[in-house]
Image: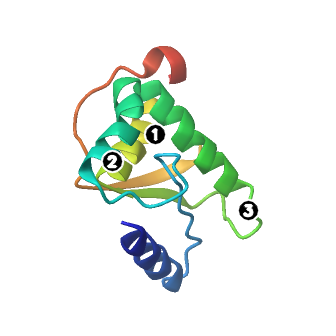
Amino acid sequence: QEDLMYYTLHKVASMGSFAFGADMYGTGKALWDKEDIKNAGAPLRETRSKMVARTLAAYRTMQQCAEVDSSQLFSLGFCFGGLAVLDLARSGAAESLRTTFSVHGILDSPDLSPQFG
């Protein structure tokens, strides 16, 4: 996971974009054990507004970086990260987000409007 994230960030940066990675699980390390991954993600999957809040915090942190062109922001996520970027886009909370790429993300329909719409 960690290697894939660093590889993807490097590839995005090599194409001239600013690349920013976030620890969505909040563990400070890559998780390899399926049970650890399931347990770390459960609170965010169960309360999707928490997922949006965490993703939005990372998004806003990225926006503060001097190298970022805030008119060209996009999000990219794989698997759990794919779910996170879809929820961020669905919520409407990331006001200048232009595009979202979800690879192997979950395509469900959470109701995020009361808090973020």
Q: Nearer the viewer, residue 39 or 4?
A: 39
Res 44 label? none
| Label 3 SS | loop
**Rendered view: 112 above or below 85:** above
Q: Dot 3 surroundings within 10 Å: few (below 14), some, or many (20 or more)? A: few
Q: Are marks 2 and 3 in contact (CB under 8 Å)?
A: no
Res 65 label? 3
Q: How many marks?
A: 3
Residue type (three-letter) at the residue carrying disc 3: Cys
Residue type (three-letter) at the residue carrying disc 1: Leu
Evaluate whether residue 93 shows in this view: no
Going 49% across and 80% down the picture, which residue do you hit? 10
Cα distance, mark 2 to mark 3?
Answer: 29 Å
Look at mark 1 in the image and give the residue it sits on: 88
Cα distance, mark 3 to mark 1?
Answer: 19 Å
Quarter of the image that includes the N terminus: bottom left
| Label 1 SS | helix
Identify the residue at the far top of this view: 114
How far across and how far down the image is residue 55, in percent?
A: 52, 43
Going 48% across and 73% down the picture, which residue do you hit? 9
**Rendered view: 112 above or below 13:** above
Foreground label between 2 and 3:
2
Of callouts 3 and 1, the N-terminal one: 3
Q: Nearer the viewer, residue 74 or 49?
A: 49
Look at mark 2 in the image and give the residue it sits on: 37
Of callouts 2 and 3, the N-terminal one: 2
